[in-house]
Image: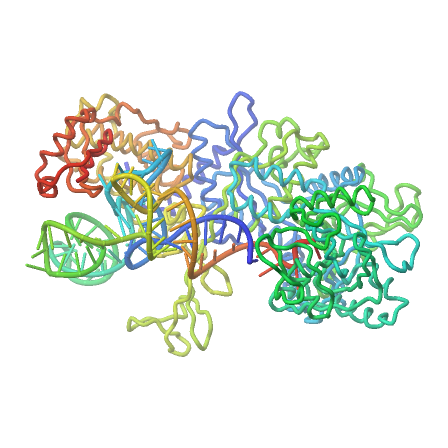
Amino acid sequence: MLDEKYNPQAIEAKWQRYWAENRLFKVKADPQRKKYYLLEMFPYPSGKIHMGHVRNYTIGDVVARCMRMRGYNVLHPMGWDAFGMPAENAAIANKSHPARWTYDNIAAMRAQLKRMGFSYDWDREIATCAPQYYRWEQWLFLKMYARGMAYRKESFVNWCDPCQTVLANEQVEAGLCWRCGKPVRQKKLWQWFFRVTDYADDLLLYCDRLPGWPEKVLTMQKNWIGKSVGAEIRFEIENPVDEKERDIAVFTTRPDTVFGATFMVLAPEHPLVIKLSRNTSQNQVVAEFVERMALQDRSAKTVESFEKEGVFTGAYCINPMTRMRMPVFTANFALMEYGTGAVMSVPAHDQRDFEFAQKYGLDIILVVKPLDSELDENTMSAAYIADGILVNSGPFDGMSNKRAQGEIINYLEEHHIGKKTVSFRLRDWGISRQRYWGAPIPMIHCPDCGIVPVPETDLPVVLPEDADLLEGGRSPLPVLDRFIRVACPRCGHAGARRETDTMDTFVESSWYFERFCSPHYTKGMFNREAVDYWMPVDQYIGGVEHAILHLLYSRYYTRVLRDMGLIDYKEPFTRLLTQGMVCKESLACAEHGFLLPEEVEDHTGMPCCTKCGRPVSVGRVEKMSKSKKNVVDPNVLLEKYGADTTRLFCLFAAPPERDLEWNEQGVEGGYRFLTRVWRFFSDWIDGVETVAPFDGSPDLLEGGARDLYRKTHATIQRVTRDIEDRFHFNTAISAVMELFNTMAGFKPGDASAATVATMRLAMDTVVLLLSPIVPHFAEELWQALGHEPSVLQEPWPTFRQSVLTREEIEFVVQVNGKLRSRFTADADTDAETLKKMALSDERVNKFLEDRPIKKMIVVKKKLVNIVI
RNA sequence: GCCGAAGUGGUGGAACUUGGUAGACACGCUAUCUUGAGGGGGUAGUGGCCAAAAGCCGUGCCGGUUCAAGUCCGGCCUUCGGCACCA
């Protein structure tokens, strides 16, 4: 029996209840069974899910459901990346509390995810803001500290004085604080770091050993790590101010040009800048310059808008090869964070140095000459950066610059003035946040002992959840007596203070996938056995916006865990799928900016703004965002069409890695398809309910029934391949639609017994193939077909090659490669016969017109091409 | 500037493995039937040129390889994404 009308709300509620009551998604580690760990990037609990979540989690859910039917033991968990600044900001705005706000949001979003019918094992749900979670993060921090993998150093951060807080780069807008609007400055602060750079080489190496990752992501990671091979060279300071600092070290990728180095540039933050200028007439100018640079907004440092400027420090150093005096400058384009913070400038062979030399009238010395042309440093208009032959380079003259790179490095090493070295763009991961809503760093500052780790037995260092937030987003921790006051664990000193920095939220997300394996484990970060069984994640799915940070940090953290002997794999994610964005066109009025769809009226065929009546322009298709007012609320879709239609459209409209353009009519198309299938089933159900599906040789069937039988098997083959190998759900769905279109050609009244049995197979198949995509819909039809629930415990359908092979197929005839005719023949007809058949074809002959045939090409089971 | 991806009907997108029938499937549109109407549904059509057939043209552009190119090779253009004073 099947209700006449498809009522998504009713059946979705029914089956969600059924799944929950029967705990169908609960999984246990079972060494007897093949495991499959499917993970989607867990969400930040912002309050409600958006279409990006819907798409991401729908893709994952289809794979999870499909793999379950394929017999795998599937781990498919969900949790919350629950620490972070939005909670603090919202709490300040609503006079609430971050914890309260976060847990309320989690409850709301959990309900929404359940409403989508996702097959999560909810017993494994975790929230990273729970002490039971972050206590293990703190535990690992202590281990990392003990091994020197976590350390503290002084470094520069964006600092807002009025707000008394550090700002993320994203919170600095045009050099001003996003909250108070006052200028941001670079402040030196003591901060905690993870030594990611120790793993730079290994992280880079393994980029080539992750065949299941998109090339794009690997390239981005490689670029981010940014390995450069070169040399470190020391330049003697002419009049050292300090016995210990007699030279300046530089990093260069072009040691072959060292004879052309005519001046030195230091980053403004370089410690030598102030020291070197102190006793010179440049003293004042340099101090002012350095101060001004510290105030400059770093995010505005773009190539075009940024004027290169620098000042002479008053000091000189000596080129170790030429013994020439080189003026030492400080300039805004030198970066303290890269290399050594000092650059040997070779204006003849570096465009930036060239421009700087011209601006400040500095010497240009040519040391690499092109092979086939002349070049003069007095007349050159741009730096020569290509390869060539060394000149003005003493003993290295005449050598190719490529070879000279190695030879000069040897020379430097022999004379102890330099060495071969590698520099990375990647820097150590600064994890300190002067923020409240995060996991406390488990350290104590003792006046006598210095930094003392919190003893393991005192973990977790619980973040006090009842602290009152302060104005401007300042962390309340530094003034919260009951939090900071602690006796030194080492000497008992009563004046010790807790560290008040919290950890970057990316730390929590760097190991949550391991926690999911044993989410309630109390004796460690995770149960080793569970992790050994489930990890690594077989398929990870998420947005490409995490291509660098989250994915790189997770790879790093996995290496840390491995080197501590806690796990025995290096890479956490075997396969990665980065799904595209969900986009929609925006609507804009010249007067009122972006408009919501309800702010547009369309009486005359020309959409107009309801506020001013002006015509509305349709903007580009862009990622859904509040500011563009082009968002679609999943709740509205759920109410109007239900979860199954929403899922169906997300999968059908585009392959997962591409951007998805939202189209309301497309959604309706999906809904119509489900309604049509429903109606078809309701027409046929009485006739097929008690009939066994046909499962014999196609020879026993005739005509249409045989075609339907073949089509059914062919569809199983296509859908299986599309979902499993490529995640191309769009073509999988279209294959099912094709099968359904074939089925729709039959009418229940005039079908033979064999046809009804074949139809029964087709109907079972359609339901099974659709069940991962529209699970509630499939459950309902499955039950109506007389099966016991649940369809998701059924095995995935299989196809037989013998059903697919046809004895007769259609051959194509081409003349000079163009399609001219077709004919039907036995599949195994030999080439000679096929040639004859092609030549006897009437339509073909028209094209031949008695012209001589040069050649005939026969492709087995496909075509004949006649060349004239 | 460097790195990466993508350009196919009015639209989203198909064309797999290995070059072999371009446009599957859907949206939209047109005609028509059904209904009191709205909605919904059914049927037929739908790359361009042509009244139609025949035919010709057609996968960003130019060239090449091949019996045959959306697919392979060389060069260019455009769009999107990432990084960007990295020494």
Q: For this rendering, which residue is in front, A202 or A401?
A: A401
- Residue sitting at 69 percent across and 46 percent down? A404
Which residue reaches farthest bottom?
Answer: A612
Q: Position of residue A669 (x, y in %)?
A: 31, 51
Q: Quadrant of residue A859?
A: top left
Q: Quadrant of residue A510?
A: top right
Q: Is residue A183 left or right of residue A689?
A: right
Q: For this rendering, which residue is in front, A836 or A580?
A: A836
Q: For this rendering, which residue is in front, A330 or A345?
A: A345
Applied colour scheme: rainbow
Q: Position of residue A661 (x, y in %)?
A: 40, 55
- Residue sitting at 75 percent across and 46 percent down? A462
Residue A80 in the image: above or below residue A612:
above
- Residue sitting at 60 percent across and 33 percent down? A517
Q: Position of residue A42 (x, y in %)?
A: 56, 45
Q: Position of residue A102 (x, y in %)?
A: 62, 52
* Number of numbered tags placed on the structure image: 0
Q: Is residue A792 visible?
A: yes
Of the 4 image quadrants, the one containing the C terminus of chain A is: top left
